[in-house]
Amino acid sequence: MKTARSTRIPGAAVHAPKRAERREPGVWQRFAQQWDYQSMILPSILFLIIFSYIPMWGVLLAFKEYDLFAGFAASPWVGTLHFRMFFESPEFWLIMRNTICISLLKLAVGFPAPIVLALMLNEVANMAFKRVVQTITYIPHFISWVVVSGLVFSMLAVDGGAVNGLLLQLSLIDRPVNWLSVPEYFWAILVSAGVWKEIGFGSIVYLAAIAGIDPALYEAASLDGASRFKQIFLITLPSIAPVIIIFLILGVGNILHAGFEDILLLTQNLNNGILMPYAEVIDTYVYQMGIINQRYSYATAAGLFKSVISVLLLLIANYTARKLGKASLW
């Protein structure tokens, strides 16, 4: 049986059969292929749209004289009247002073505190002791400010307060001090309570960043004779510097967010008149003008001013970090 021979002209090129070109799937096709993964973040996206983006239409209230009976659409436009009233109010500079000073204190004390705690926990060799310390420092984050303010009141009480009792035993004071009646002490009390509440939870991110450092770097440094203290400054801190810078950028963006719930509760719902010259910040002022005094348009203007300044500070901080060659948000 003869086999068929393939006839080929000498010198002719052999062309391979053309393959079907692969087309990249479109956005909706990729979404359909990853639907099980996309559905996991869908509730968060809906939450963000409903509670963050849709209410942004409410900022138009700052440019209107809101009439409760006429409604949002029928209320007359007044332009920048409420902004001028806020800037010209006698409380403006006092509010700005308190807001900036409290925010800077929280940033100067509260920002490095979790970093220091994470570095200290990283040096602990006893894992059982390390877990106990981590648990003790994490728990206050999950405690409501209502409970924390009650603890502060109990510890600083004139009769039976732990702080006064300790200071009397150490002969540092002659008689109990009513700490929450001295305005000059309020900033220190507020910042200390905030640091105690958030220091453990804030250290989680830094501990995770430290865990990702290559152990070979520490071994090489120890062979070169570097002490543990030098290894912290030469290896640990430079390795987690991008994380630190990102959180610092976010902290600068929140420089006008001096706090609301903690100040509201420590001043007994803004009823402690002695502390108000040191406790009135933009957030509590907005609450007082909008909710208590029902000046909705005026309070919206004050809140919008704070938001615009915060966005500008965030942009400036991110631009500066990017220009310096450091980590940035975008």
Image (tube, grey):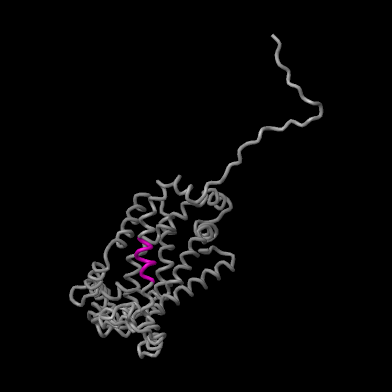
Q: Position of residue 244 (x, y in %)?
A: 48, 63
Magenta run includes residue 55: yes
Q: Position of residue 269 (x, y in %)?
A: 24, 77
Q: Residue lying at the far top in this picture: please name it.
A: 1
**In the picture provided, is 150 more to the left or to the right than 91?**
left
Q: Is residue 190 above or below residue 47?
A: below
**In the picture provided, is 235 more to the left or to the right than 84?**
right
Query: Start and end of the magenta stretch?
Result: 47-56
**In the picture provided, is 21 more to the left or to the right than 311?**
right
In the rendered image, which quarter contains the N terminus? Answer: top right
Magenta run includes residue 18: no
Q: Position of residue 221 (x, y in %)?
A: 56, 53
Q: Residue lying at the far left in this picture: please name it.
A: 159
Q: Residue lying at the far right in this picture: please name it.
A: 11
Q: Is residue 10 above or below residue 214?
A: above
Residue at the spot x=65%, y=36% of the render?
18
Question: Which one is nearer the viewer's eye here, 200 or 6?
Answer: 6
Answer whether residue 200 is visible to the viewer in this image. no
